Image: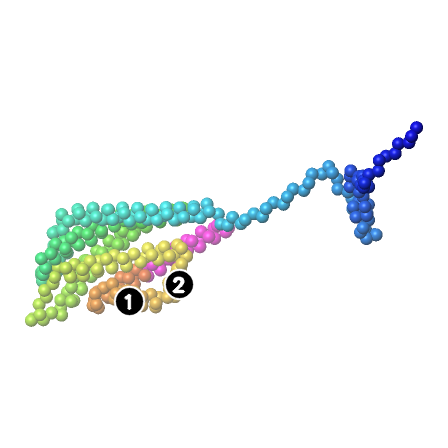
């Protein structure tokens, strides 16, 4: 039999490559583990059973200030402004209604106003001066009538910001505020204005007789009454400052010289430029200042006693 020979190919077939990766010096795990320093132990093989490490969490941004807190603060401010607007609206409505009611008695009120100078008489020099004066008089008297209601609304607005022990004195303070205001107005109209009018009229001569216009006279009287009504609130002002701890009796007694200068200066600013009205305002205000010192002593002593009892 003839021997069969494999046909010769024109080119050499490539050697068959292994199906898996060939371990060489660069890929052999033993070589990799032994490539470090000789005294370093070989790294342990990672366990295939452990899950891969989770990716790191992305950096969180700073949320900044809490928007809810800002919104609450803004809403609180808006609520307070709304309450203040309500106080102003209610006070204005009450004053307007009182002005309308007082208009029907404006003639009698005007006769009462000119009592201190009824011997000299009062005139009006413009056609609308009498009408405007009666209208102003109605507004001022109406404001005096509704002053307790306005004080009550103001105290109601301030009340939520007071402590429980401070709320107990709201009613006495409301009564004291109204009483002192009316007392100052009555003192000005019944005591100060007649004396001031008599003093100022004494500067006339035989050839220079007074001719008093009703408009300027009304401005003169209303300014004095309002000024005395406000300065008679000094004890209450000192009372509040003493409660807040802003002033104390030692401070009031130590600064009495400055207090006298301030009182005299305010009297000169709030009264007409005559000595009688200035002195008659400065005198009662000094008495009120002394009373304010006594009020401050009482308030401060009570507060210190309360603090000592809390510490014990």
| Residue 108 counted in the magenta span | no
Earlier-in-chain disc, 2 versus 1? 2
Q: Position of residue 249 (x, y in %)?
A: 39, 61
Q: Secondary structure at mark 1?
A: helix
The residue singled out by tag 2 in the image is 251
Crowding around mark 2 (Cα neighbors within 10 Å: few <14, some 14 to 19, many 20+) is few
Q: Position of residue 196 (x, y in %)?
A: 18, 64
Q: Position of residue 251 (x, y in %)?
A: 39, 63
Left or right relative to 213: residue 142: right
Inspect this view and state whether residue 298 appears: no
Q: Quadrant of residue 223 in the image?
A: bottom left
Q: Quadrant of residue 120 in the image?
A: bottom left
From this viewpoint, which residue is outermost toward the right?
1
Q: Nearer the viewer, residue 28 or 261?
A: 28
Inspect this view and state whether residue 48 appears: yes
The residue singled out by tag 1 in the image is 265
């Amino acid at each position: 039999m003839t021997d069969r020979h494999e046909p010769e190919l024109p080119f050499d077939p490539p050697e068959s490559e292994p199906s898996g990766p060939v371990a060489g010096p660069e890929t052999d795990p033993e070589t990799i583990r032994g490539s470090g320093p000789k005294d370093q132990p070989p790294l342990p093989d990672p366990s295939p059973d452990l899950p891969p490490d989770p990716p790191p969490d992305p950096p969180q941004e700073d949320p900044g200030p809490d928007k809810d807190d800002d919104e609450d603060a803004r809403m609180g401010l808006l609520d307070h402004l709304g309450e203040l607007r309500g106080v102003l609206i209610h006070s204005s409505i009450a004053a307007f209604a009182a002005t309308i009611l007082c208009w029907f008695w404006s003639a009698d009120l005007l006769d009462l106003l000119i009592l201190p100078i009824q011997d000299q008489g009062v005139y009006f020099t413009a056609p609308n001066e009498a009408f405007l004066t009666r209208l102003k008089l109605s507004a001022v008297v109406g404001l005096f009538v509704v002053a307790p209601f306005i004080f009550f609304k103001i105290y109601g607005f301030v009340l939520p910001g007071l402590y429980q022990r401070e709320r107990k004195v709201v009613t006495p303070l409301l009564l004291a505020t109204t009483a002192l205001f009316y007392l100052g107005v009555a003192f000005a109209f019944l005591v100060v204005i007649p004396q001031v009018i008599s003093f100022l009229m004494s500067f006339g001569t035989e050839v220079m007789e007074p001719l008093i216009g009703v408009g300027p006279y009304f401005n003169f009287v209303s300014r004095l009454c309002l000024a005395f009504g406000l300065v008679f609130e000094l004890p209450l002002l000192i009372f509040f400052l003493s409660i807040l701890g802003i002033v104390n009796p030692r401070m009031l007694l130590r600064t009495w010289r400055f207090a006298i200068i301030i009182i005299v200066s305010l009297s000169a600013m709030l009264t007409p430029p005559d000595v009688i009205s200035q002195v008659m305002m400065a005198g009662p205000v000094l008495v009120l200042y002394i009373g304010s010192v006594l009020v401050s002593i009482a308030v401060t002593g009570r507060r210190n006693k309360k603090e000592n009892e809390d510490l014990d």
